Image (spheres, rainbow, N blue to C red):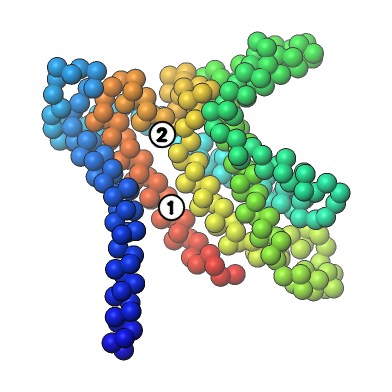
Amino acid sequence: MFAVFRREKRVNWLEAPGLAVVLAVTQIPFVVTITLSFVSWNIKRPDLDPSLNGLDNYRFLFSDGDFYRVMWNTFVITGVSLVVGLALAFVLALAFNRDFRGIAVARSILVMPYFVMEPVIGIVWKTLILSPTFGLNAVLSKLFGVEPTSFFDSKHALWTIVILCVWQWTPFLFLILLSGLQSMPEEVLEAAKVDGAGPLQQIIYFKLPLLKPYFKVAGMFGLINLLKVFGIIFVTTQGGPGVASANLSYYVYRTGFYDWQVGRAAAISVVMVALTLFLVNIVFRFQGDVTKRP
């Protein structure tokens, strides 16, 4: 027993440097952010020293109409993109979970958007595809004799961001669900066929229940990544018009580097971290142990 205790103690000491690095990299910046959220500091005014202002930054946020609009935008971008992305990923996983000529090339083309950087996605879609002046949008509108749609105005900007997020993150969700389908026990599906289950019945009563752990993992990682979308918004709309398409990630940047209010930007960051932890905790609460099959 003492040998086991000594061995466990030795393993803990070996883990200590790694734990210290993780704490230094993650927790120290967060503590600094929390501290700054109680500070009034305009970095464009070096003549004004930073000063503690208590909860004034938080009071300003929760009395600001733009902040609530940005919160709503964050929920829309994250929630709609995740639900639509999971649905499309499941359909694509079903379609590509088979062998046919060129399957490797087709899968590679399908997952390419996931490996493209967010600023590149924004530039390509904004200029080459959705531009009402010289993009594909303009060409098709002229071909059909209609007025080109301005996808980045106040009416369409938020939903355009959602479309771009779905386009980027569906391949990632597709890879997770496809791996689940490929690891599914063949004997279960064969037994279902013998019992007379058709393709739709197999999907509803067998494939969906068996894919539940993979849906949970895909949902959790999709939620975390969609909450922090920044590059697409920065390149395409810059949160505008006004804050019509801004999420919390971009609002932090805008408050810190457009309004030069470091304290308010830090307060928004703290709220964003709290929101992310709350939503992830909900996912964990409902998902249970994702390593077990239902």
Asked whether, in this view, residue 35 is left or right of residue 94, the answer is left
Residue 146 in the image: x percent, y percent? 74, 12
Measuring 46% from the left and 22% from the top, which residue is drawn there?
238
Which residue position is annotated with label 2? 249
Q: Amino acid at mark 2?
A: Ser
- Secondary structure at numbered mark 2: helix
Q: Residue furthest bottom?
A: 1
Marks 2 and 1 sit apart, C-alpha to C-alpha, by 17 Å
| Residue sitting nearer the eye, 281 or 111 | 111
Residue 75 in the image: x percent, y percent? 47, 39
Measuring 77% from the left and 73% from the top, which residue is drawn there?
187
Whether residue 137 can be seen here: no
Chain-order first, disc 2 or disc 1: 2
Which residue position is annotated with label 1? 280
Asked whether, in this view, residue 172 is left or right of residue 260, the answer is right
Based on the displayed image, in which of its 4 quarters is residue 30 positioned?
top left
Whether residue 30 can be seen here: yes
Residue 272 in the image: x percent, y percent? 36, 40
Task: Mark 2 and mark 1 in contact? Answer it, CB < 8 Å.
Answer: no
| Residue sitting nearer the eye, 4 or 36 | 4
Q: Amino acid at mark 1?
A: Val
**If the image is split into quadrants, where does the C terminus sit?**
bottom right
| Residue sitting nearer the eye, 170 or 283 | 170
Measuring 18% from the left and 18% from the top, which residue is drawn there?
46
